[in-house]
Each structure stands twice: as structure tokens, then as C-alpha cells.
Image (cartoon, rainbow, N blue to C red):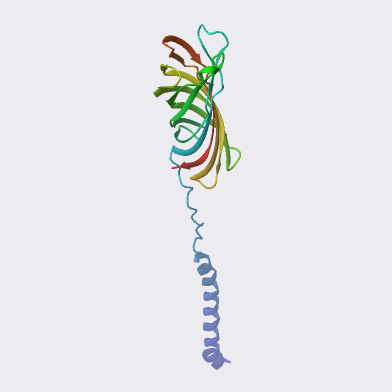
Amino acid sequence: MSTWFGGNGACAVLVLAAGVGMGAALPAQAADMTLPAVKAPVVAPVEALSPWQIRLRLLGVLPQDKGSVNGVPGSDLKYSDSVVPELDISYYFTENWAAELILGVTKHDINGAGSLAGLGKIGSTWLLPPTLTLQYHFTEFGAFKPYVGAGVNYTWFFNQKADSADDLDVKSTFGWALQAGFDYMIDQHWGFNVDVKKLFLKPDFDVTVAGTPLTGKADLDPWIVGVGVTYRF
């Protein structure tokens, strides 16, 4: 009995002790083991848009046929329509509020009507009608972005030519403007635009017919209807 304990018994005790020690060490080692942190995927930020925007439109300029010559009973005037290209520039103060300036020129004939019908084409004039509007853009309809606006217009009349009249001078003047339209955005930058404006424009004019100087008012008040493309920088 003593021989077994002193020989093989001693070995068994040592093996048992080693096993107990390893068993105590394993939980400690397991507690020390930590899994590597899993990082969330990085999502690229939405590209920030510039406050600047431009549009290139094709405009139909449709004046109303109304006007008169002072002191001539039954006098009236008619004007030709026009289709012209136009560039406008917008600046966004906020996501909803923007200012728009339109730039373009258009030419119109002035014709006699009513008691002036016998004069036919009285003359023609070119117009430069820069119009500045303050707009509110609705942003809750996704790619469809309607807006409304109001502002002021100043129209220069130039390159005026008299036909049946001896002389013609339409006076440059201020007017008011109302606006409604929408952009349909294809992506962040490009879109399709439809726009309608109403200008309240009633310039005075001087005209000389058969040597007689006359004055009057041209009630133009044109509708301006445009379609084109939008680019947001």
C-alpha cells in the first residue's frame, strides 16, 4: 500500500491537482476573451445642394388685346403673340423660399382695332421684361415640387418702329407679376419645369398719325407660359 501511494499514487495526486488548476484557469481565460467590435457600415451622406438653380425655357408671350388712344372714341389695339427662349436664375434662401429672375427679349406688333382698324399695323417694338419674383416651394410631394410666387417687373421697350404711324414711342414701365408652376425632378440636379406668369403691364405711349401727335395706353397684361429644363447646382 505504501509503495503504491509513494509511486503511482503520488502521480495520480499530481495529475488531479493539475486538472483542478486548469479547470479554475479556463473560466478566467474565457472571461478575458472579448469579441472584436463590429462596425456599422458607413453610409455616404446625401450630396449637399447649392442654393443656385437655373432653368432654360421656351416661352409663349400672350398679351391681351386691349388699349386706347386718348381722344379717339371707340379706339382699341391688338398685339401679336411671341414664342422666345428664356433663361432664369433662382437662389434658395431656405428649402422652401427662393427668388427668381427671368431674362429674355420678345418682339410684338401693335395693330389698330375698333375705330383704329383702318390703320392696320401701327408699328412694332422689342421688349426686355426682367421679372423678379419671391417664390414658396412645396417640398412634401417627393419629385413633384410645385411653387407659387409674386414680384415686380420692369419692361424696357426698344428698337421701336412705326409702320402706318409716323412715329411711335412706348414708355418703359414697372408692373406686378404673379406666378405658379412646378419642377418634376429626375434626380438631385435635373428636372422638367412648367411655369405660368401673369404680368400686369400697362405702358403709356406717344404716337403720331398723319402729322397729329396722340397719346394712349397699351393694356398688355400678358400671360407668359413656359416649359423647359431645370438644373440645380
How many numbered marks have been drawn onto this rendered protein structure? 0
- Observer able to see residue 158: no
In the rendered image, residue 178, in percent from the top left (x then y), is placed at: 54, 24
Task: Tell me where residue 143 sits by quadrant.
Answer: top right
Residue at screen point 41% across, 10% down: 211
Toward the viewer: 67 or 202? Answer: 67
Task: Tell me where residue 167 sits by quadrant.
Answer: top left
Toward the viewer: 65 or 48? Answer: 65
Residue at screen point 45% across, 29% down: 107
Q: Is residue 171 left or right of residue 71?
A: left
In the rendered image, residue 191, in percent from the top left (x then y), is placed at: 52, 43
In the rendered image, residue 194, in percent from the top left (x then y), is placed at: 56, 37
Toward the viewer: 109 or 61? Answer: 109
Image quadrant holding the N terminus, namely bottom right
- Observer able to see residue 176: yes
In the rendered image, residue 158, in percent from the top left (x then y), is placed at: 39, 24
The residue most toward the right is: 141
Q: Is residue 165 left or right of residue 16?
A: left
The residue most toward the left is: 159
Residue at screen point 47% across, 42% down: 231
From the viewer's perspective, is residue 215 above or below residue 187?
Answer: above
